[in-house]
Image (tube, helix red, strand yellow):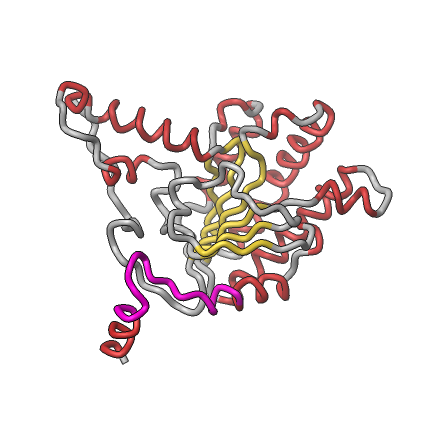
Amino acid sequence: MSTPSRPRLFGSATTEVPDVSDVPRHVAIIMDGNGRWAKQRLLPRVAGHKRGVEAVRATVRASIERGVQFLTLFAFSSENWRRPEDEVTILMELFLRALEQEVAKLHKNEIRFRVVGDVGRFDKRIRELIAAGEALTENNTRLTLTVAANYGGRWDIAQAARAYFNAHPEALDTRRALEAEALEPYLAMAYAPEPDLFIRTGGEQRISNFLLWQLAYTELYFTDMLWPDFDASALDAAIASYQTRERRFGRTSEQLQATQTQDA
């Protein structure tokens, strides 16, 4: 007997035209530049990562104040295991410490905490803290903070396909084409709308295997600012850029203007 499919909570921008507002409902960020920030100050790389945690706190506060409902942070990619072993060890220690010290604060501030990625590679203690934090904050609604850890966009699509066929083994016996919408409920972030605004700090202009499926119609914003320097004013600059974009979702400008006139 097949397992019931997961509920589809949000639509896809490739099949539906989502509501658009001046404040992005979902902001996704690649937090880049911690190591370079430290190097510029002749400090060890770990100092940049520690300072980066402070930038996370500031960004969470600023997101709530500005009305962002979902904030997703790319903390550790599936490719980051290629970094020097000592740096990976430090990053895991910082992640463990953050889980131990920050989740209770998130809960106190009514923030829902989620982790997406292949967490099976993490130590048992980290996995236990992730599960406990998600359970503790499950019903909070002020902001959904998602940390992407050991995450890759290609991994996400592959695991969604596996989950779909596990739930619908009969689909393997048909020749009907697999529709994209069938996979959406099985993606790691099916509980969140697709990002409205993507931010990458540190000067690089690529998405680095982050939310490949979900970024189809996301507005992209790149800044040279290194992540430890990111703050409320930097978020405001990104949102201001977002507000200048014409979000057509495949339509023409004339169609968009006509729709806006009808809604006025």
Number of marks present in the image shown: 0
Left or right position of 160 against 204: left
Identify the residue at horizontal 73%, vertical 48% (top origin): 51
Residue 82: % across, % down: 63, 24
Q: The C terminus is located in which quarter?
A: bottom left
- Residue 155 falls in image quadrant: top left
The image quadrant where one finds the N terminus is top left
In depth, the one of 79 and 204 nearer the eye is 204
> Which residue is located at x 58 percent, y 60 percent?
61
Corner quadrant of residue 180: top left
Locate residue 171 relative to residue 229 in the image: left or right.
left
Q: Residue furthest right?
A: 42
**Residue in view at x 14 percent, y 23 percent:** 175
**Residue at horizontal 49%, vertical 48%?**
72
Magenta run includes residue 253: yes
Instruction: Give residue 237's quadrant in the image.
Output: bottom right
Residue 125 on image: x %, y % = 57, 27
Magenta-colored span? 241-256
Instruction: Give the image location of residue 149, x and y in percent.
Output: 53, 35
Q: Is residue 73 above or below residue 19?
A: above
- The answer to if 32 sits in the magenta stretch is no
In the rendered view, would you say 186 is above or below 112?
above
Residue with the most extreme bottom position? 264
- Horizontal side of residue 222 vs 171, given as left or right: right
Instruction: Choose between 34 and 167: the one closer to the eye.
Output: 34
Looking at the picture, how far across and down is residue 213, in whole percent?
Answer: 38, 41
